[in-house]
Image (spheres, grey):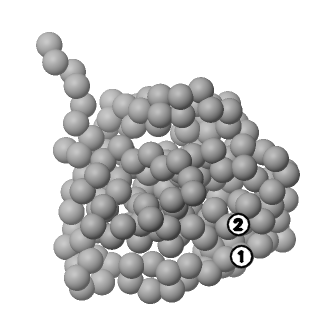
């Protein structure tokens, strides 16, 4: 019996969300499947190829799903990166450009110790703005980015180009 899981079959497109002209990649069908979710974690861990990770950083909000699972699987801490005003302690912040606007991200100022090895995770690599801003936050705190992992990469938006100084892993490319 063939039990191979095709992750792209668990992603549905939502047209004109959150704005007209955007095709939103909905990962909730994947989250409904424990087998597909485990396959994602297995593939991300395998892609690390033995790299030492001290903490996983996940971006609000969909980066939290697999980011926390990855941190648990790796036996390391998880750092949430959030929109302004959502974190209760002292923060640092970075502005970034989305494919449909401008926003800002924040991280707790004490989340990373200088020299820690950091895995950054999000669900989708689009224009690369969110990931690049997160990289700047991590590096401002002295973190060493060992890899960026994404469930999906929208290759036509060329976000990987903004991350050319880093190792980037994406499981699904469209």
Which label's residue is closer to the chain start, 2 or 1? 1
Q: Please rate how many residues cluster around mark 2, counting C-alpha atoms within 10 Å: few if below 14, some from 14 to 19, many from 20.
A: many
Question: Is 105 left, or right, of 107 in this rendering?
Answer: left
The relative height of residue 59 versus residue 73 in the rendered view (above or below) is below
Residue sitting nearer the eye, 75 or 49: 49
Picture quarter containing residue 75? top right
The relative height of residue 103 versus residue 41 in the rendered view (above or below) is below
User: Residue 78 at what x, y percent from top left?
Assistant: 67, 47
Residue sitting nearer the eye, 121 or 161: 161
Q: Is residue 42 visible?
A: yes
Q: Please rate how many residues cluster around mark 1, counting C-alpha atoms within 10 Å: few if below 14, some from 14 to 19, many from 20.
A: many
Cα distance in 3D space between marks 2 and 1: 7 Å
The relative height of residue 37 versus residue 160 in the rendered view (above or below) is above
Question: Is 18 left, or right, of 54 in this rendering?
Answer: left
Contact? badges 2 and 1 (CB < 8 Å): yes
Q: Residue 110 carries which label?
A: none
Residue at the spot 68% in from the left edge and 37% down from the top edge: 53
Q: Which mark is residue 137?
A: 2
Residue at the spot 33% in from the left edge and 70% down from the top edge: 157
Q: In which quarter of the image is the C terminus?
A: bottom left
Residue at the spot 27% in from the left edge and 41% down from the top edge: 7
User: Residue 25 at what x, y percent from top left?
Assistant: 29, 62
Say which element carries label 1: strand
Picture quarter containing residue 85? bottom right
Query: Label 1, on which residue?
Result: 93
């Amino acid at each position: 019996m063939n039990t191979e899981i095709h992750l792209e079959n668990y992603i549905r497109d939502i047209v004109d969300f959150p704005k007209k002209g955007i095709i939103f990649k909905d990962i909730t069908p994947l989250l409904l499947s424990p087998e597909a979710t485990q396959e994602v974690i297995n593939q991300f861990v395998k892609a690390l190829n033995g790299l030492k990770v001290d903490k996983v950083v996940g971006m609000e909000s969909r980066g939290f799903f697999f980011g926390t699972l990855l941190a648990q699987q790796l036996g390391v801490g998880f750092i949430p990166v959030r929109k302004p005003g959502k974190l209760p302690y002292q923060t640092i912040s970075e502005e970034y450009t989305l494919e449909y606007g401008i926003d800002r991200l924040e991280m707790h100022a004490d989340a990373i110790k200088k020299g820690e090895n950091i895995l950054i995770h999000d669900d989708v690599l689009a224009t690369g703005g969110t990931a690049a801003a997160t990289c700047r936050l991590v590096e401002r705190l002295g973190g060493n980015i060992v890899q960026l992992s994404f469930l999906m990469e929208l290759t036509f938006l060329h976000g990987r180009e903004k991350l050319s100084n880093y190792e980037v892993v994406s499981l699904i490319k469209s």
